[in-house]
Amino acid sequence: MSESYGGQEPELEAIEVVARAWWLGLIVGLVTLIGGIVLVAYPGPTLTVIALLVGIELLIGGVFLIVGAFGHPAGSRAWGVLGGALAVIAGVIVLRHPSGSVLVVALAVGIYLILAGVLRLVGAVEASEGRGWLVLAALVDLALGIVIVSWPKFGITTLAIVLGIVLIVRGLALVMVAFALRSVGRELASPAGPAGPAVPAA
């Protein structure tokens, strides 16, 4: 006797759509990773350059988080949307004050990292793919966010290195999750489809 799983079809369809766009996550991850490497390798640019680079990355990452959230189960979807919205807001704040003080940029990014770290940690627990990398990225966000808010009077070079580390870890996490989504997409696209629960023989 067959069992119907029609109630899961909308969620499976949403996951499949996001899995097909795994390459978008890969691109965002690689851009983030390269930006982090540049900041760590060349930590001497002006505050304006740092703010523009980080602000643009936050905007791109925020949009990606919001879009990707719709591939998650309904219960955990809100965490991705909220995290993406926070990234967009932080990106706008940083871009609006690219030539401001190091304190403004540091506090905006630090507060965002703390909030995003908490949201990422909650979302990572409920994630089915790339959970380990998501947890690592969340813990790094939390730790560095707390450091920045506790001691926001960084020099430009120190701020660049700290933000570079954040971007490198985030970029690696996004790349690994993108490959995990590619595997899910291939599984969903296979003739057998996703493996369902075993039905005991009569």
Image (cartoon, rainbow, N blue to C red):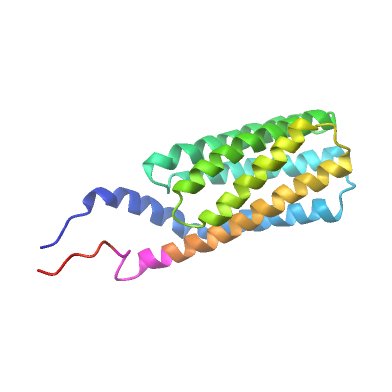
Determine whether, in the image, residue 123 is placed left or right of residue 163.
left
Where is residue 30? Give x, y as percent.
Answer: 66, 58
Is 68 left, or right, of 173 in this rendering?
left
* Left-right relation of 3 to 52: left
Residue 5 appears left or right of 128: left
| Res 60 quadrant in image | top right
Measured along the vertical axis of the image, is residue 192 above or below residue 48? Answer: below
- Above or below: residue 35 compared with residue 120: below
Q: Position of residue 141 (x, y in %)?
A: 66, 43
User: Which part of the image, by quadrant, shows the N terminus?
Assistant: bottom left
Q: Return the x and y of residue 75 as percentages of the image width and height.
A: 38, 40
Within the image, what quadrant is residue 48 found in? Answer: top right
Q: In the figure, residue 104 lies in which quadrant?
A: top right
Region in magenta: 185-195
The stretch drawn in magenta includes residue 147: no
Q: Nearer the viewer, residue 73 or 28?
A: 73
